[in-house]
Amino acid sequence: MTGSPILSDGGAVKRALRLFLCKAVWLVAVILVGGLFGATLVRYGPGYGVDERELDPRLSQASVEALRGQHHQNASLLSYYGHYLKSAVHGDFGTSESTQRPISELIHQRLPVTARAVLLGMLSAWSLALFLAMLGQFLRGWIFEVCSTLLTGFLLALPSTVIALLFVYFRAPVFLAVACVTFPKLFRFIHNLLVEAYEQPHVLAARARGIGPVRIFLRHVLAFAAPALFALVGVSLSLAFGAAIPIEALTDSPGIGQLAWFAAINRDLPLVVNLTLLVTLVTVAGNSLADYSGQLAARAS
Amino acid sequence: MSAPKSLRLISAFLLCVIFLLALGANFIAPYSYAKQFRDAPAAAPSAAHLFGTDALGRDEFSRLLYGTRVSLLLAPAAALLSTLIAGILGGLAGFLGGWWERAILASADLLMALPLLFVLLALRATLPLDVAPLISAMATFLILSLLGWPSSLRVIWAAARNIRESDFLLLARSSGSSPLRIIARQILPNLRPVLAAQFWVNIPVFILAEATLSMLGLGVMEPLPSWGNLLRGLENPSAFHANPWTIAPLILLILVVFCFQFILPSREDFA
Amino acid sequence: MLRKLRLLGVLTVFGAAAAASAQAQSGGVLHFCLHGEPKTFNPILVDDEAAENVRYLTGGVLIRLNRQSQALEPGLATSWHISKDGRMIAFQLRKGLRFSDGTPFTSEDVAYTIKSLMDPQLHSPTGDSFRSGEGAVEILTPTPDTVSITFPAPVAGLERLFDQVAMMSAHSPKKEMAVLGPFYISDYKAGSYVELARNPNYWKHDAQGRALPYLDGIHLDIQRNRDIELLRFERGELQLINRLDAESYKRLSKDSSGTPRNAGTGLDSDFLWFNQSPNAPIADPRKSWFRTTEFRRAVSSAINREDISRIVFDGHAKPAMGPISPANHFWFNSAIPAPKYDPQGALKLLAQAGFRFANDELRDKSGNRVEFTLVTNSGNAVREKMASMIQQDLSEIGIKVSIVTLDFPSLIERMTRTFDYDACLLGLVNTDLDPNGQMTVWLSSGENHQWNPGQKTPATAWEAELDKLMHEQATALADKDRKKAFDQAQQIIYEQQPYIYLVNRDVLTAFSPAVQGAAPTVLTPPAFWNADVLQLAASPQQGAHK
């Protein structure tokens, strides 16, 4: 997406507002298309419209036929999606076919669990990554390099399913598993960013003038790295959210991830549509924040 | 973060050794990966079975060798395809800009937002039943590569955009070069380092993705082993206590991914 | 002074009695898991395992099947009788009973429940079990404690079916949440837990006259992951596991965190079948193989069931040969021979059908290599292991088997819609002792007649014979006539092998040492069928964990 004009006067403010609105409309369009994609996958994918209950030998022929007929109301995907959007605007997100519960209720119950795991996971990962990256700049030795490489390499090399299994076995909180998946990538990027920042001419000049390391870090290094770090917040949000989904499914944590897995396995069309919209929203919002911050950084430099 | 040269050499050497062992599985493995020794299920390591046997009495060492072959040969192929797709689309988005850029980035965002596990479930279920396990393994990696390109796209797009705004490209345009010539002579050669970096980054990503899928029961089909379905043995702590060698695939996976990280070009971007 | 002493004595006696009674009623809160979210708490709509478990613990039924003796016992009804034509059943209800909210229980509630259950729009498996013919059900309530129900046609095993029908109140403002069972639902957090509290109005008392249940309540965590359930049990957070797999049983046997119990051979079976549907989009040689009786019998003989029991189930399974497990005392046909692993016998049968075995390959009359694909559901490690063992066994007689695992909806679609598969490996969870509950499996027109469902007319003579025998057992009034007909049906199933039965799994459960009164059984629910008499030990070391 293209950059924003410099905000220097009232006309520029109007232009910025118009651009912001255009971007918002574009984002909404992308999110809606994402929901339609998800709906199409479920509707036309194998296994849609079948119900495990059909295999119950106690059910009569009429009951089996009634079960099979339940899914025919979703026959036209576009009209289903249109009807869904119309209801969603009024706050009715439909009913889950597999649990027979209002989807708004399901999301209301589960989103805080995932939000907690994602936010605490991100906080933990960011705290550790920033701390280690800053420590690395102050220590600056091969021992630190090797240790940090080994730690991040080890965590990167572990499949998220193995991490989830370990956390199941040790009954550790889910957010730590999310942090384990997010931390190594964050650390590497932040470390590289700080290294680049320290190599900037103005930082070298500050060091030559004898300014203390803490002041250099706060006044010069962070100022340079801030836009990229803000961009990283957006991307790490998408990453943490993406990591939370399989981890929740494996650790049986009652969050959105487990619900998404359950919806996929059961071909629950209304639930998949809603969750796809939610995941698309988080992903697109995260990436947009990253893009915008990146543009700010480019203008600032 | 760049690794010292000696470390990169050691990593490359280790990878070559593991690669060669995997290629030579037919000659090195003492047994077929499917043969069941039913008088010795879940056996501890012994002279007959170096790493013991699994729950069905299959030799773990043989399965590890054949599993390494599947994971280590197919992952680079998938990484290559994924990088090529990301390279073409990212290059177009960065070079052309405007609506092309928006459409391609939006497509990438959409693909990343899709419930990947469900997409894999659905695609796998549409495969014909009577395909050989190796073909289904290749299909799994193919699907991963077709779905995995968005993660590399933004890096390549950013690099292509920088090239677009560079002076030498402006010079080439102003001198009347056609777009095709500009792409072939200016864009691609300058994108090569980024593409190479993404290729190396993607190999361990696909190895891990296959491992994750197989642990969820969506990966390579039995009896063909892969690191992922070998790692399913870790789901049962009793089996691990009875035979700690169950962890061998995980150690090998970590070692290989480590090695790939050490031989990566320096200053890889966050992807 | 003497008067004061007497008063003190009386007070002491009463105090001790109250304390003893309080101790008996203070049985603690039992913690265990449901393996899924209950879809409903309405007892007549229940069709998933989690909801059935909740229904069992909260529902009061007219007739209860004793899970241990497999005999029918009075429940809310003190007695009942069935008319000679098998269409009418009349109950004498217990007097003075109340629902958990205090609403009186009368014959009106029975009428309301049955009427709701038999609503044709409901499509409930419990209701469908009662449907025997066209026409409405007639319910008469001459007095508040008598009720008679007349069905349009005889219902086989009628009285036993009432074990699944939990009575609902016609008048209570709490609707289906007012219950007659030992517990009622006091709290529910979707995705997390269901909390059951002791029903103070529960009608049952023990032999000493103490009110049941002993437990104060039951806390049911919703936990799909069995590994987490096992870990929690080992840590003392849970006091029982209703269904344990063989691996977990082995692990618990080694540590002292709990007592794993094997209740014996269960009713469930695992089996495979070949697709014999004429609409199946499979190549012709395969269709003709699968329809050949000798082929199916040869495959059955070539499978080593003992190895499957020993290796996959760690010995906690028995080779199976028919649809009825030996655990089903009355209906099991003991005349059917035990399965024998006989690959040489298998090759002889195949030779009779024109197959040739040479160079480790089996070929049919036309020289086609015999191979097929075996599908099963993904994520089920036990079935995947069984499939691998079957693959190896059949390779010994030259048959090449490829294994494909699919997610359940995709598998069901292939089984019931597209018929695009060769052979399928699945299992049947049998909650019903009476074979009448399997009518749609054995009737050729049945939707669950998996190898060739929904036939307009029987495709083979033996299926026509099966149809006849199943109708006979469904309409016969005397149990011995029904047994005779179904024994013959089992004999046909054994001879024709439309389902190749593999094993009957043992029912494995686990209890914490704190649980008193545990007596696991093979019928569902195996571990807590007698929840009203379970107690938790009072000592701190063995007490319940919150």
Image: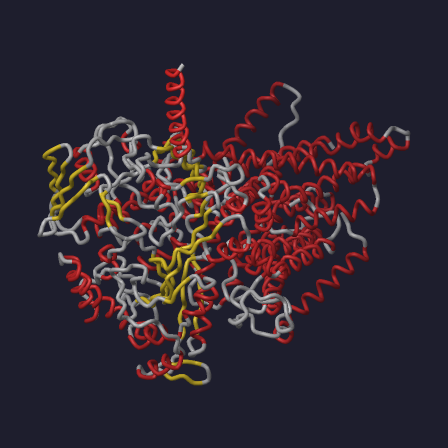
Q: Is residue C181 left or right of residue A3?
A: left
Give percent across and percent down for residue C527. Answer: 39, 48
Q: Residue furthest front?
A: C2
Q: Is residue C291 above or below residue A146?
A: below
Q: Which quadrant of the structure image shows residue C181? A: top left
Is C204 or A235 nearer to us in this picture? C204
Q: Is residue C150 left or right of residue C498?
A: left
Q: Residue at 31% x, 83% y: name it.
A: C352
Q: Which quadrant of the structure image shows residue A201? A: top right
Q: Residue furthest right?
A: A209
Query: In this orientation, does residue A104 appear?
Result: no
Q: Is residue C187 above or below residue B166?
A: above
Q: Is residue C59 left or right of residue A276?
A: left
Give percent across and percent down for residue B59. Answer: 58, 69
Q: Is residue C301 above or below residue C190?
A: below
Give percent across and percent down for residue C381. Answer: 47, 58
* Quarter of the image that includes the C terminus of chain B: top right
Give percent across and percent down for residue B172. Answer: 71, 48
Number of numbered discs visible in the structure rendering: 0
Is A14 or C76 nearer to us in this picture? C76
Give the color scheme: rainbow, by chain, secondary structure or one colour: secondary structure
Query: In this orientation, does residue C389 appear?
Result: yes
Is C1 or C429 nearer to us in this picture? C1
Q: Is residue B244 above or below residue A121?
A: below
Q: Residue at 61% x, 18% y: name it.
A: A10
